Image: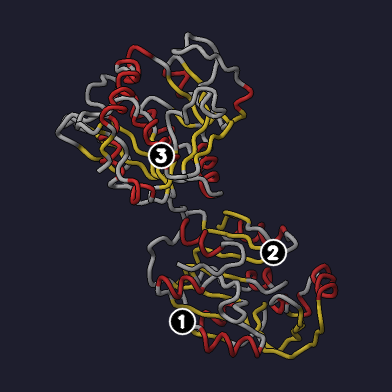
Amino acid sequence: MQFYSQFGQDQFLFERFFYGKRDGIFVDIGAYDGKTFSNTLFFEQSLGWTGLCVEPLPGEFEKLRRFRTAACANTCVSDYNGIGDLLDVDVTNDARMLSGLIENNDPRHVEHIDRVLIQKRVIRVPVTTLTNLLQIHNLTRVDYCSIHTEGSELKILMSLDFEQYDISLFTIGNSYRDGRIRDFMAQKGFELAVEFHGSDQLYKKKSLKMLPRTTVICAVWHGDPDRFDLLEGHMANLDRQTRPIDRVYVFDGGDTPPHYLEGHVMIASDRLSIYQAWNLALSMVQTPYVMNLNLDDRLAMDAVDVMERALDAGSDLVGGDWKICYTQEDTDAVTSSFPASELPFVPAWPPAGDPTRLGSGTGLRGTFGPACMWRTHLHQALGRYPYQFGDGTSIRVIGDAVWWHLLAQNKKKLQRIPGIIGNYYSHPKNQAEFRNSATEEEQRLKVCGIRLL
C-alpha cells in the first residue's frame, strides 16, 4: 500500500478508523493536483472510495481532473456563493498549495509567503460553500472530509449545515492554532483526536471510536480457583487503557467462561500450557500489534499507549519495568506509567516483600518483563510462539526468553522502556515459574532445541 499525505494523515486514518472499510465517501477541499500530499488518494486507489475533490487553481485543477476518478470541482470554498480574489503564489517545492483567498489570509501566512515566493498574482475565482457542494453532488453522508485552504477553514465550517450533512471525521488545516476552530467543533459534537506535525488537526465525532491497534491475549487456567474474580479485575484494567484495545481470552480444560466476559473467547477441551494458549489466541489476532498479559498482573493506564508509540517508532518488540506487588489489591491499584528510577531495585529473587521493581525496563534482570508487545506479522516469518521442545514436550517457563532470543537472532529490534508500565503480582507459591524449573528447561533446550511449527 502506498500512502501520500505529507504527515501520515492517510495512514493514521486508515489504521485507526478505516482499516478494511471499502467504498467509503470522502470530500477533499484543497486537493491541489490530486496526488501531491493528498489525504484522500490512498482511499480512492486502495479501498475503492469515491467522493469529491475541490481545487481553485486552474492549472492544478486540470491535473486533478485528469488524474482522479472522484468528482472534481474548480472553485474556492468559503462562507458565501460568488466571486473572490485568490492569491496564486509561485514558490518552490510544490508550495503553490499555500494559495488562498486574500480576504481570509492570516497576516502571518502572508509574511511566510513573502519570504519564500518567486512571484505571485491575484486571480478571480468562483467561491461557494461546502453545504452547496454537498447538495450539488448529493453527498449527505461523508466518512472523511479534508479541509486545507490556507485561511478559510473556520468560515467553511461555520457555514456547513451539520444537521443536514453527516460527516464523521475532519482533518483541518490550522497552521496558526486558531483556538476558535476547536471551540466551534466542540459545539458541534466533535473532539480533537490528534494534531499532526505541521498544521493539520484531526476532529472526530465524540461517539466515533478509534480502532484498536493492539490485541491483549490472556490464558485462563482451569485450575485456578480465583480465575473468575481475577477476570473481573483484568477486564476492568483493560477498560481503563487510554488507547482502544482488542482482547482474546483462552480457556482450557473445557472450562466455561463467565457470562460477563468481554472480548473474543476460545475454549479448548484439552489442558494447555500458557504458551499453547497464547498460540490459540494469536490465531484470532487481527491487529498489527499484540501483547500478553497474565490474569493477575495489571497495566498502567497508559501502558498500551506508551508501548504502541515504541513500536510505531520502529521497534519490533517492547517491554518495560514493573512495580512488584504482594497482594492482588495492591496489584489492582494502578496509576499512569512513571520513571523506573522512582522505585528502588532489590536484586534478591524471589522478592521478599521489599518495595522494589522487577528491573526488566533497565536490563538489570535480563528479562523484558512479564508482558511485552510485539508486531503480529513477526509470526509469519518466525512461526508460532515457542511452546514445544524439539522432542515434543511442552515448554512451561522459558517460552518468553526463547521468543526474545529468536527475535534477536533474526536481527529484530527489541526495546526496553525504563518506566513502570504495570504492577506485577509476586506470589511464588502459585506461579508457574516457581512450580517448574527454568534451569531444567534451559538444559532441555540445549539438547532438544525447539519446535516452532
Q: Which residue is mark 3?
A: 291
- Identify whether 325 is placed above or below 316: above
Apparent side of residue 15 relative to residue 313 in the rendered image (left or right)? left
Q: Mark 2 falls on what kind of element?
A: loop
Q: Is residue 240 visible?
A: yes
Camera-nearest residue between 197 and 157: 197
Q: Mark 1 falls on what kind of element?
A: loop
Which quarter of the image is occupied by the N terminus? bottom left
Q: Nearer the viewer, mark 2 or mark 3?
A: 3
Say whether disc 1 or disc 3 marks the residue closer to the N-terminus.
1
Which quarter of the image is occupied by the C terminus? top left
**Residue at the image point whose x is 38% and y is 69% from the top:** 22
- Give how far across and how far down residue 312 sits, in percent: 53, 50
Q: CA distance from mark 1 to mark 2?
A: 28 Å
**Residue at the image point whose x is 64% and y is 73% from the top:** 156
Residue type highlighted by circle 2? Asn
Q: CA distance from mark 1 to mark 3?
A: 44 Å
